[in-house]
Image (cartoon, coloured by chain):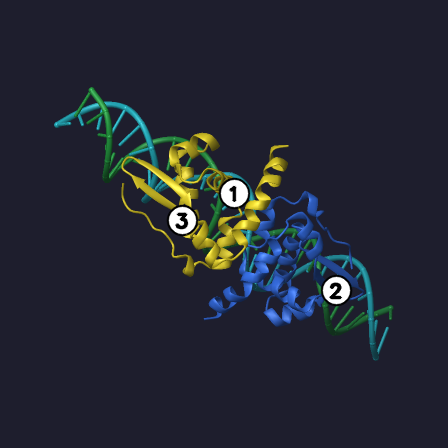
Chain colours: A blue, B yellow, C cyan, D green
DNA sequence: CCAAAGGTTCAACGATTGTTGTACCGTTGA
DNA sequence: TCAACGGTACAACAATCGTTGAACCTTTGG
């Protein structure tokens, strides 16, 4: 699988980071990764019921704001949160978001 | 001045809150209000050099995600952050964002 | 009562976004 | 070698966004 762009967290603006975390689908992806750690892309797709292209699209945005790293395992790809690096760049931000995703998810499901 | 819609923070989704905080101009407005407290709209406009309509537009978005309250002082209007209510709805979020605005502002200005 | 000033609303625009489907590329297993 | 599979890239679309300018409404001051 071809290599893919990963942003240097140092180059990410706060506005870009906030934008990356402003979509409901991306928040669900982030929540899932925070819960499960490194996860196969196909499993994320299955669990969240997103199309292939759309998953790839949102993955890209998350990579471009320094939140997600893609790991190449041959044919199977997987993703994981760059929690520590993101925390170093935006202290406290990811934690606050993660703390608030759950309650929001419930609200969205209601 | 006519009354204007203010969202109940309880009705605001996390995604909406993140969206409200995902624009550079809105982040500057929020930072200014966090620094100065209640501020006249015209002063914000002057300080940030935004057009009248655009200011009103961004104010509306901030009101719609429960972040900003408009105060009617006759002809002169002013705005202030709903910091406590927002904190109650999304614990830790606004604080984390505010902590990160400064460094980002410097980056944007560079 | 009238003109000026502070804000909001509306129409319009270019740009960006989220979504889908299709074509494409790299890897794997027969 | 070749077909199937996992992901990405691209084109297209409707929808939304940020910005501007003009029209409008309220309040204030003369």
Q: Is there one chain holding both mark 1 and mark 2?
A: no
**Marks 3, 2 in one chain:** no
| Relative height, residue A52 to residue B40 (above, below) | below
- Quadrant showing the N terminus of chain A: bottom right
Q: State the residue position of label 1.
A: B27
Side of A69 relative to B109 (left or right): right
Q: Nearer the viewer, mark 1 or mark 2?
A: 1
Residue at horizontal 78%, vertical 56%? A2
Decide which of A19, C17 is in the foreground and name it.
Answer: A19
| Dot 2 alpha-carbon crowd within 10 angstroms: few under 14, some 14 to 19, many 20 or more | some
Query: How many residues crowd around disc 1 within 10 Å: few (fewer than 14), some, or many (20 or more)?
Result: many
Q: Chain of mark 1?
A: B
Q: Return the disc, 3 or 1, that comes first in the chain's sequence.
A: 1
Query: CB under 8 Å between callouts 3 and 2?
Result: no
Disc 3: which residue? B63
Tell me the CA gap for discs 1 and 2: 36 Å
| Chain letter, disc 2 residue | A
Q: Position of residue B54 (x, y in %)?
A: 42, 38
């Amino acid at each position: 699988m071809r290599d893919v762009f990963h942003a240097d967290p140092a180059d990410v603006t706060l506005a870009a980071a906030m934008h990356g975390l402003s979509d409901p689908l991306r928040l669900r992806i982030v929540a899932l990764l925070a819960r499960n750690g490194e996860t196969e892309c196909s499993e994320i797709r299955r669990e969240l019921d997103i199309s292939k292209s759309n998953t790839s699209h949102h993955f890209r945005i998350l990579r471009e704001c320094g939140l997600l790293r893609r790991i190449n395992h041959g044919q199977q790809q997987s993703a994981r949160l760059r929690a520590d690096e993101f925390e170093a760049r935006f202290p406290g931000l990811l934690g606050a978001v993660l703390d608030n995703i759950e309650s929001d998810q419930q609200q969205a499901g209601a």
